[in-house]
Amino acid sequence: GDYSEFCAMQGVWPGEWPGSESTASGDADSTSGDSCEARPKADWRTTVMLRNLPNTLTREMLLQMLDEKLFLGQFDLVYLPVDFSTGTGLGYAFVNCSAPVFVQRLWEAFDGNSEWPVESDKVCT
């Protein structure tokens, strides 16, 4: 494994490291010291983290919301961790889309969402 392989595994590209600057074209600033390869033209990432979810939202409820928002067949994994001592969610979830093309629509559907199947004032980010 070389450094660029590490960057790809982490999903981090030049200009995205904390404290680094990027140019308007998205390439790393030559002074940043990063030696990762430039970002690919088409993004290949497929996992979306949904934050600030109601703690009482269950995985089954999230799956129902995904179905209602017409994402049926566009994801292959939903992970909503729970606190085993209380049985409630931890307030976040990961959804892995089956192809990168679905990521933007999924993000747009949930970013800013405040309509939940449970009582909550939380706004998804």
Image (spheres, helix red, strand yellow):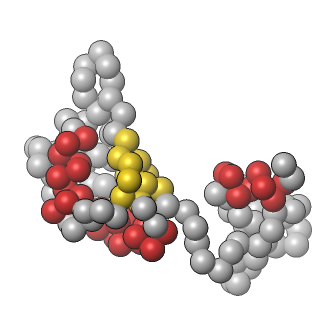
Give the side of residue 61 with respect to residue 77, left or right: left
Q: Is residue 116 above or below residue 28?
A: above
Left or right of 121 on screen, residue 7:
right
Tell me: residue 37, above or below residue 76. below
Q: Residue 42 falls in which quadrant of the image?
A: bottom right
- What residue is drawn where x is 19% and y is 56%? 65
Which residue is more in the foreground, 84 or 45? 45
Circle count: 0
The residue under the point 76% across, 51% down is 6
Quadrant assignment for the C terminus: bottom left
Residue at the spot x=74%, y=56% of the render? 7
Q: Position of residue 123 (x, y in %)?
A: 27, 55
Q: Is residue 25 above or below residue 30?
A: below
Q: Nearer the viewer, residue 82 or 101?
A: 101
- The reply, left or right, for residue 25 in relation to residue 121 is right
Q: Is residue 102 visible?
A: yes
Q: x and y percent of residue 5 in the render?
A: 78, 55
Residue ID at (43%, 54%): 96
Work out whether residue 118 or residue 84 is closer to the camera in this orientation and state it.
84
Where is residue 115 drawn, in percent x and y?
A: 16, 57
- Residue 28 on image: x %, y %: 78, 71
